[in-house]
Amino acid sequence: MKFDITKRLPEVDLALSRTDNPRHIAILQNYIRHANLEVSGLWQGILAPDMMVDNPLYIFHSPQGLRRIEGMEAVRAEYESYELLGNTVIYHTDGEIMVNDFGFMTEYVSNRFWPGSLLRANGEDIDDPQATYLVSMTQSMYWPYDDQARVIGERVFRGSDRTVRKCQPEEVITMQDCRDLLIPHLPPVHDPLTGKPREALR
């Protein structure tokens, strides 16, 4: 059964319904904007000057080791690779999120669609490189934000409970599905002083 991609961040929706703090609202809305641009392959919007600081730092921890991605050009290349490789689409289950003035922390099960050919190229033992697979694992993240509610970077911790399952064609969610269903409802950039949408700085 195909997951309803419009419900891909239920923990964030719940957190928004429970706060009236303007800065927290801005952080959460800007996270939704970031996350939905990412799964839609529209990564250029994530890097906009009203969304991200000039010199972001991403650190990924996983059972395979640590990856450090520093600076705008390196982060740009990382997001562009997701679009080119065709593994942008992610949805969350079993999620929790905590937000404060510094940013947010969240834990959830990440469910990400991968082309079988890409998994095989990465050394995965799969039987059909033409199929799409769902890779699921527990993931925790901490994202700090600056005084303008722009993301400073990501600290991502990936669990060792990773599973890989071959998808039926009818359950696959594509990048175009995300663009069609998420982008018409994309939240604008929010201001941390008011918790309301503000004009872009561009």
Image (cartoon, grey):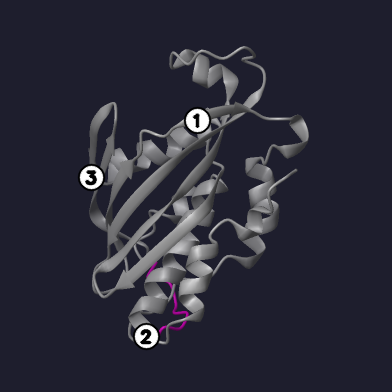
Depth check, front residue: 46 or 155: 155
Determine which residue is flagged by label 1.
Answer: 163
Q: Report the Cα–Cα distance between label 2 and label 1.
A: 38 Å
Determine which residue is flagged by label 2.
Answer: 21
Q: Quadrant of residue 158?
A: top left
Q: Quadrant of the N terminus?
A: top right
Q: What residue type is labelled 2?
A: Asn
Depth check, front residue: 24 or 108: 108
Q: Where is residue 167 in the image (x, y as percent from the top left)?
A: 67, 30
Residue for point 36% across, 36% down: 77
Crowding around mark 1 (Cα neighbors within 10 Å: few <14, some 14 to 19, many 20+) is: few
Q: Report the Cα–Cα distance between label 2 and label 3.
A: 30 Å
Q: Where is residue 105 in the image (x, y as percent from the top left)?
A: 32, 61
Crowding around mark 3 (Cα neighbors within 10 Å: few <14, some 14 to 19, many 20+) is: some
The residue range painted magenta reads 194-202
Determine which residue is flagged by label 3.
Answer: 71
Q: Where is residue 140 in the image (x, y as percent from the top left)?
A: 34, 50
Left or right: 84, with 159 as reference point:
right
Q: Which of marks 2 and 3 is nearer the N terminus?
A: 2
Depth check, front residue: 202 or 33: 33
Q: Which amino acid does label 3 sit on?
A: Gly
Q: Position of residue 37 (x, y in %)?
A: 52, 54
